Amino acid sequence: MNGAQALIRTLVDAGVDVCFANPGTSEMHFVAALDDVPDMRAVLTLFEGVATGAADGYARMAGRPAATLLHLGPGMGNGLANLHNARRGRTPMVNVVGDHARSHKRLDAPLESDIDSVAGTFSGWVRRSLAPEDVAGDAVEAVAAASSAPGSISTLILPADVSWEDGAEVAGPLPVRPAPRVAPSVVEEVAAVLALGEPTVLFLGGDVMDADGQLAAAQVAAGTGARLMSETFPARTTRGAGLPDVPRLPYPPEMAIASLAGTKHLVLAGATSPVHFFGYPDVPGHPVPEDCAVHVLSAPGEDGVAALRALAQAAAPDATPDVLEASRPELPTGELTPRAMAAVVGALLPEDAILVDEALTSGVGLTELTSGAPRHDWLCLTGGAIGDGLPMALGAAIACPGRPVIGIQADGSAMYTISALWSYAREQADITTIICDNGSYAILQHELSRVGAASDGKRAGQLLDLGGPGLDFVALANGMGVPATRATTAEELADQLRRALAEPGPHLIDAVLAG
Amino acid sequence: MNGAQALIRTLVDAGVDVCFANPGTSEMHFVAALDDVPDMRAVLTLFEGVATGAADGYARMAGRPAATLLHLGPGMGNGLANLHNARRGRTPMVNVVGDHARSHKRLDAPLESDIDSVAGTFSGWVRRSLAPEDVAGDAVEAVAAASSAPGSISTLILPADVSWEDGAEVAGPLPVRPAPRVAPSVVEEVAAVLALGEPTVLFLGGDVMDADGQLAAAQVAAGTGARLMSETFPARTTRGAGLPDVPRLPYPPEMAIASLAGTKHLVLAGATSPVHFFGYPDVPGHPVPEDCAVHVLSAPGEDGVAALRALAQAAAPDATPDVLEASRPELPTGELTPRAMAAVVGALLPEDAILVDEALTSGVGLTELTSGAPRHDWLCLTGGAIGDGLPMALGAAIACPGRPVIGIQADGSAMYTISALWSYAREQADITTIICDNGSYAILQHELSRVGAASDGKRAGQLLDLGGPGLDFVALANGMGVPATRATTAEELADQLRRALAEPGPHLIDAVLAG
């Protein structure tokens, strides 16, 4: 058995049975070995950023890592932005990065580059397999490291000859470190803080954004008067009717500061203490008031749901959580504003949907107008590196073949990884993509004025404008085999979304937004 | 004057007056400052790999660096593959990578990542500007480092507040280190080797691939019997009638080994000693025979043209270089094979064209059938990271607005940076792109069999196949504002190429290849 065969069998045995791939020459034995291990599903992407973003979306939904197959340093480089998002989302992932054969490594061939250094910047675990005999053992360590709480990225660098040489054997999976319990004394301390009755925010993120975590938090809130809030971009949130309303910390610094004003205690459960995305002139770097004490109930990687349940038991044993009733917005008519788009989504969101949100500025009203919709999961852009939305939707669809995936995707951001659409078509993934087509990097137009820069310059404005020529997303989707339509009114969007959801496979709707 | 304003003015004064940009929030002051410095031309790209590849193509043709503007670590990551190619091509380039404000850096905000470590893997010069007062001085060092022979990449990391704060001043350019002369004793030693009359190859690359270098090398060859050969993928080669025939070292290892078999002396001028792109089972890592002595006439970064002239004077003072006569293939008819495509290009290549070659396996016959065409320049994929072709053509067109650019582009490779087409349309760049549409990663199908992997597996084959669905490059081009046609016969390609060349602005031809 050669190294590649042992690697793939070992990964499958360890529960990693999907690989998002964009291979090159140094990965040819891995590719060849796929025919020996039919339990490994390989999904071809045309660009590595699609592979890494899909692995991110996959793991958020499946709760276990996918593998990626990347071609040397440049292939890993193309995947870097979405590896950044995955790192920030604490997504478990196992990268297999092919490298030159060991004998070739020293020759400084054209594709030679410092894979190890770059991998170190986003990985929690990095290893270069040195011999076929080592590959399987390295692979099970990679999977265990990635899967242990909190999730992280493991990168296995696989020299071509380690892949093609014989002498490898399959290894059995290693135990995954479960999330440790929070000490009872910590829960007691937080309960004591809540008992003070001072203005308190229970700040949620990470693992507590599932239904159980939010319900436990809502019980605490109901019994103590603490407010609930979540991090701005949680990796995965379960939402909808029957769950509590957990507003997100707003993205704009001024709004974030206002939302926490007067808070005396910030209790963190699964989240870290919030900071603004960017620094701005004359604005503090984070929204937490100076006289607010920050308490850690559970850090990322600890069992936050158990901690919240213990807290509920201690601080609010008899309280009943407030939850949202089932409600949907009415279907809007007329002008297709961002809010009208959000209302159409809220009105039509199917049961058990997965919503992938990279709407950025066009997402106004989207969380509000979907909050009473049937139960669904919501994936956010965790690391701020735009271009994760289209790939994440692919991964989510592969992870959950029975669930409809809806991607709400900003137009400028879509172009970073647009070839994801081809993989949608090849896999016939059940994804409906709504492009928020405003013809600009609207978020940067906001930012240009926010940073205090003169925003009326013509040349500056041209760098934030996606017109001249406009992007025709219907043509782009059709060019990659995805059926597509264009909506210019709320009625058209509703009609097209209804039809897309009724039919399996990928669809794209170019929502031309007004205002 | 704030840091951004000083930086842009300083870059322009140092001769860097084109910036390929994909900005984000942390670069907003740079964007705003563009309106203060109209001599800086900013070219918007929708993906950073287009920006870095365009800067690569620009500098190869302009002979001086362009700047890029990249958004933090993820933006730089998206540019990494083409930065790799630029490093391998010894392309001068100045990256400006925005980062968080200094006060924000320590907060581990969502977009925080280790920019410095990643930049170090491809840059010859890296610096983080620490204060507005430093920016201009850092910038002139960056330009001088990038421009000094051989070219290299400088990366200036620019914290947002260093950009927005006042107190900066413009700095004057620093001297660029010229390529040092090769010592006369080295020339004499090589002349003595040539005088032995043993089988010798004069192996050319880098700076000697211009007309003067090749003519001097051909004089040496004519007078000594040495054979001429060039590196496989020179960054820029001047070619055509009136210049010598300099065959390239073939890419496939077996062919490369055969082409150097029997060689006793390999004399390097501007090139390094060749190695194969990849290691393969039971194949040596390089094509140089074991009993062949390698002599360095000029290393990359030395003045190779002067060295070759001195060598010609010493070894072959009275010889006349053999040069190619003007000749063009006849326009082919019928089936559109790769060779027919090459013949069409050879028959119609306009005077003074720039040919950007990322044809990969579809490039069969392309160099041969264009060798007697009117004088032109030829840009190759230097580092093996596919996806440089479309961006390089953009940069070449910006550098040489009066010259027609023709991109011969493999289909799979095109998808890595397909959004370059949008920038073509926005800039109305005079680029004709011929997509070599064979519906597969054909190079990997070759490689799969070459590495000895079983190539008949269905699942392996699916990972190298771009069908299901096929990519419709006409739709993709139209979706980004580039007029496009499809050619399925040699006549159609000729007709469409003639028309595209006759009309300014971008055109794309989807050449559906047979066989």
Image (cartoon, coloured by chain):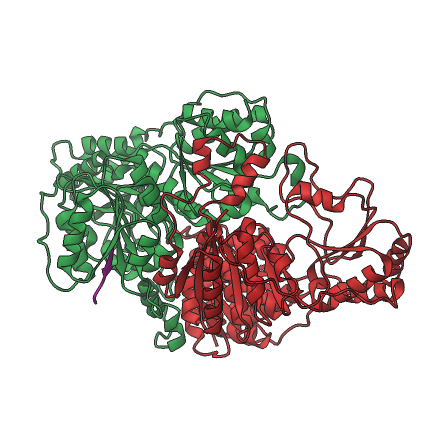
Chain colours: A red, B green
Is residue B306 at least partly visible in the picture? yes
Tell me: residue B428, above or below residue A147.
above
Q: Residue A232 at x, y = what percent?
A: 66, 52
Q: Residue at x 69, y 66 (%)?
A: A210
Quadrant of the frame with the C terminus of chain B: bottom left
Tell me: residue A280, above or below residue B360.
above
Q: Residue B384 at x, y = what percent?
A: 37, 53
Q: In the image, is B186 to the left or to the right of A90?
A: left
Decide whether residue B513 is among the magenta residues: yes
Say which of B22 and A357 sits in front: A357
Q: Quadrant of residue B317?
A: top left
Q: In the image, is B231 to the left or to the right of B320?
A: right
Quadrant of the frame with the N terminus of chain B: top right
Say which of B263 and A252 sits in front: A252
Write down the region rendered in magenta.
B509-515
Tell me: residue A195, above or below residue B504.
below
Is residue A133 at least partly visible in the picture? no
Q: Residue A393 at x, y = what percent?
A: 52, 64
